[in-house]
Amino acid sequence: MTQSVAPLSDLKRSGRGVSKKGSLTRQNNRIGLLATLPAFLVVACLLFLPICYAVGISFYKTDGVTFKFIWLKNYLSIFTSPIVHQVFVTNLKFLIAIPFVILLATLCSVLLYEKIFGWKFFRVVFFLPTVLSTSVIGLMFRSAFSFEGPVNAGLAKLHHAPINFFSSGNTAIFVVLLALIWSGFGYASIILLAGLMAIDPDIFSAAEVDGAGWWQKVRFITVPSIRGQLAFVAIINILYTFTSLFGFIFVMTAGGPLYSTTTLDYLIFQKAFSSNDMGQGSALAILVFGIISALTLTQSRYLTGKARD
């Protein structure tokens, strides 16, 4: 047998074609970079420059007008401040809401997946808190649990004395926790419902044939199948607890009584604008940014590992 060999002229033409194609690709890449350059500059001006400015003034004692370089004193005062320690513990207390958010979201997503009576209506109702801002939700709960609000009106009908929920740290935290749970379970329900929709229905049918009840299907099929979504919801809610409680605290308790409901993001606001100490407020913001970055990195590695498994 003889083996045919392509003519030299064909190889040269083929080489020119590949070279021309590569040149066209590089040209398209340059055009793409030039097209995205304005957007990158806008992001740099609105995001990176303020971050760099915050890092810079964290080494100063400043009210925004006068600047005095004090090295690491802002950071040292944060680490040694009993108020910051108390606020950090308060943030950890709000993590109590996460198991309740996950439990309630899992139950709601399972009921929606099974298409109970009125499931379309309930799907809208469950998702409603997601479209409301934290300030609006905070005002709703502030009104509901006020001294003359509907909650105390209900207690009066039960012959119970009215409770001033916002005069005590424990009861104030309880109300904020309720608002946090109510605002978070709707989004979590949608995420978990998406995970449930990816499960093969034949698995549930086979389990029913084998005599599995509702609880057995949830425990041994549903929960193991949506572990990735459950982990995602848990980590997102942890990040939410450290970064997005300002609206609740600002309209419900203003951090009181005696810093008992003050969170890290609200303390940053107090330091920078109420106390007019932007240097220490920036230093605290940088530390919170470090906590968030560590949690985000943990989330990314965990979800990447789950995807590989």
Image (tube, helix red, strand yellow):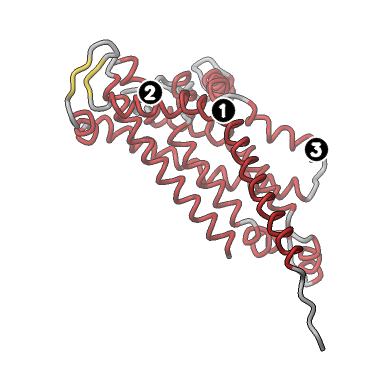
- Quadrant assignment, res 153: top right
**Is residue 300 positioned above or below 258 on the image?**
below
Q: Position of residue 191 (x, y in %)?
A: 65, 45
Which element is circle 1 on? helix
Label 3: how many residues lie within 10 Å, few (<14), some (14-19) or many (20+)?
Answer: few
Report which residue position mark 3 lands on.
120
Query: Badges 3 and 1: C-beta atoms under 8 Å apart?
Result: no
Dot in front, 3 or 1: 1
Labelled disc at residue 309: none
Label 2 sits on what residue type?
Gly
- Quadrant assignment, res 91: top left
Does residue 151 appear left or right of residue 83 in this picture? right
Report which residue position mark 2 lands on.
255
Q: Position of residue 32 (x, y in %)?
A: 62, 36
At x 65% / y 50%, what residue is drawn?
A: 22
Does residue 7 appear left or right of residue 64 in this picture? right
Query: Which residue is more in the foreground, 250 or 178?
Result: 250
At x 59% / y 59%, what residue is drawn?
A: 307
Q: CA distance from mark 3 to mark 2?
A: 38 Å
Labels 3 and 2: the sequence-earlier one: 3
Report which residue position mark 1 lands on.
39
In the image, farthest residue toward the top: 65
